[in-house]
Amino acid sequence: MSVAAEQPDDELTIPRAAMNKMIKELLPNVRVANEARELILNCCTEFIHLLSSEANEICNQQQKKTINAEHILMSLDKLGFGDYRADAEAVLKDCKAMAAKKRRKSTRLENLGIPVEELLRQQQELFAKARQEQMLVEQQEWQMLQAQVAVAQQQQQEQQIVDDDEDYS
């Protein structure tokens, strides 16, 4: 019975396109038969299954609920793949560095492509414009208040004149 026949159709595997790309990158001048590609795919899938199962056991033994990188590294050692630990640690370090770089790149300011100095200048310009607009609003309010006071004083003076005229009549 072939390895492919043993696997149910719904079992997860590495996508064939990704596997073909890896083979082409690693062995650019070598032709690999379809049967060999299928075998590589099945071996990789089995290795990942074995490694993740062992990591899950380690995780459960430590009463943890999440498998982390250390569990995977311990699984490599326990399954006899300790020789790959240094390579795995190097890949982990690269992945962490790439993730950190991606997080830094994901900020909106960096995505704008505008230098920080220019952004600060624009911000100061906007602040100055807002202060100017606020001063104009306050000045207009003050002028309206002064005009209302002047009208009120005018009315008061006119009323005073009318009251004085009534007193003399």
Image (cartoon, rainbow, N blue to C red):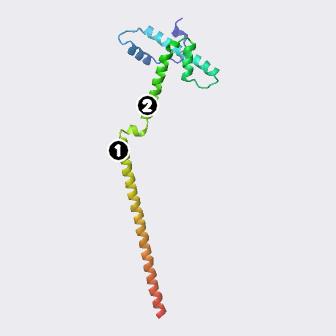
Residue closest to the eye, 12 or 113: 113
Reply above or below: 50 against 142: above
Which residue corresponds to the image point at 45% horizontal and 87% vertical from the top-left? Answer: 162
Which residue corresponds to the image point at 36% horizontal and 43% vertical from the top-left? Answer: 117
For the residues labelled 1 and 2, the Cα–Cα distance comes to 23 Å
Give the number of the disc on residue 59: none
Q: Secondary structure at mark 2?
A: helix
Which residue corresponds to the image point at 44% horizontal and 74% vertical from the top-left? Answer: 149
Q: Is residue 151 left or right of residue 85?
A: left
Give the number of the disc on residue 118: 1
Point out the image quarter for the N terminus. Answer: top right
Q: Is residue 102 left or right of residue 68?
A: left
Question: Can you give x and y, in whole percent of width and height, for residue 127 in the image?
Answer: 40, 52
> In the displayed image of the protein, which residue is found farthest to the bottom?
169
Residue closest to the eye, 29 or 12: 29
Whether label 1 touches label 2, CB < 8 Å:
no
Q: Answer with the quarter of the image where residue 147 lies.
A: bottom left
Q: Answer with the quarter of the image where residue 78 lies.
A: top right
- Label 2 sits on residue: 101
> In the displayed image of the protein, which residue is found farthest to the top?
1
Question: Can you give x and y, in whole percent of width and height, for residue 69 in the image?
Answer: 54, 22
Question: Can you give x and y, in whole percent of width and height, for residue 71 in the image?
Answer: 57, 20
Pointer 1 or 2: first along the chain: 2
Question: Can you give x and y, in whole percent of width and height, for residue 104 in the image?
Answer: 44, 34
Q: Secondary structure at mark 1?
A: helix
Reply above or below: 74 against 36: below
Amino acid on which the number 1 mark rests in the picture: Glu
Mark 1 burial class by Cα count in 10 Å: few <14, some 14-19, many 20+ = few
Amino acid on which the number 2 mark rests in the picture: Lys
